[in-house]
Image: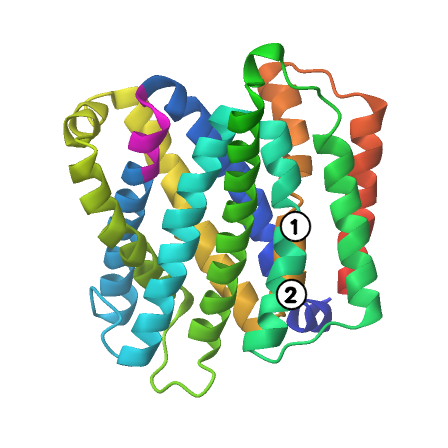
Amino acid sequence: MIPFFQTHLGELSAMATALLWTLSALAWTSAGRQIGAVAVSFNRLLIAMLMLMVCGRIFYGQWLPVDASAERWIILLISGFFGFFLADLCVFKAFLIIGPRLTLLLQSITPPLTAIFAHWRLGDSLGGKNWLAMAVTLAGVVWVVLEQPESPKEMHHRKDFAWGVALALGAALFAAAGNVFSTQGVRGNGLHGGVDPFGATLIRVLGALIFYCPMLTIARRWRQIGRSTLHRRALAITIFGSFVGPFLGVALNMKAFALCTPGVVTTIIGTTPVLILPFVILLYKEKVSPRAAIGAVISVLGVSMLML
């Protein structure tokens, strides 16, 4: 068993990331219904930043990864800008315009986009087996996501619909770019100075917050952010989501990128819409159809192919 874990530590880290992000998605949904998506999006990053800084101080004796090279800082800040700022903004807006089903479906192109970008920028390549496994995994996810039709209230005029689709595609594009820059920053790729996964995640969070602050100022949302911190239940849920998502989950994601090709990592993480099914059954008492169960099995087979 030990050699297996050593050989597939990257894939196992990605699987753990998918599970943790499933839990964080449930937390964001619950907190967002109480204080709004923008407040949750900003607060989670702020809380994660504090957690990561304390972690760095305890385990590495420094609040910030100052031993990392300036070039590595720039690479990871860019990753945070694409992954935590642009991609998240597009996803939240797309949810409001075209609904979660179609948005998640369009997000399924993130793994192949990541693989293409990684081949172009990092020289990573995937064999035919890997591409087949990615296709099987994504097919299972798409099968599940397509099951539930959007409610009439979630469909708008064609112009708005086209804008929502563009936002979802843009989110996939930005997320793929963020994944590749994350991989380059963690691996180094000729950069000087080491940085651990928690330090890399902290730099990425800072990269997003740098752009969130002026956006909230221009949009005059600071008062809403302040009021959201007074909502104890939502704050507690946000803290939990920040721990399992931007803190522990993203750190494991960085570890996976350091050990495995980005295309494989993002494909495994793309099973989140399938992993969430048991939780909605237990927490929300929703019924899962045989089609959803089949999709889950297909997705798990795809992930298994990636690890064999």
Where is mark 1, residue-wise? 109
> Image quarter for residue 130?
bottom right
Position of 122 with respect to 197 (left or right) is right
Q: Residue at x 48, y 63 (%)?
A: 254
Label located before the other in sequence (2 or 1): 1
Disc 2 from disc 1: Cα separation = 10 Å
Q: Is residue 160 above or below residue 216?
A: above
Q: Is residue 64 above or below residue 239?
A: below
Q: Position of residue 9 (x, y in %)?
A: 62, 67
Residue projecting furthest to the top? 152
Position of 55 with respect to 187 (left or right) is left
Q: Is residue 70 visible?
A: yes
Position of 307 with respect to 169 (left or right) is right
Looking at the picture, the colour scheme in use is: rainbow
Question: The C terminus lies in which quarter of the figure?
Answer: bottom right
Write the start and end of the magenta stretch as one range.
35-41
Q: In the depicted view, which residue is nearer to us: 299 or 147?
A: 147
Where is mark 2, residue-wise? 115
Q: Could you tell me which secondary element the residue under label 1 belongs to? A: loop
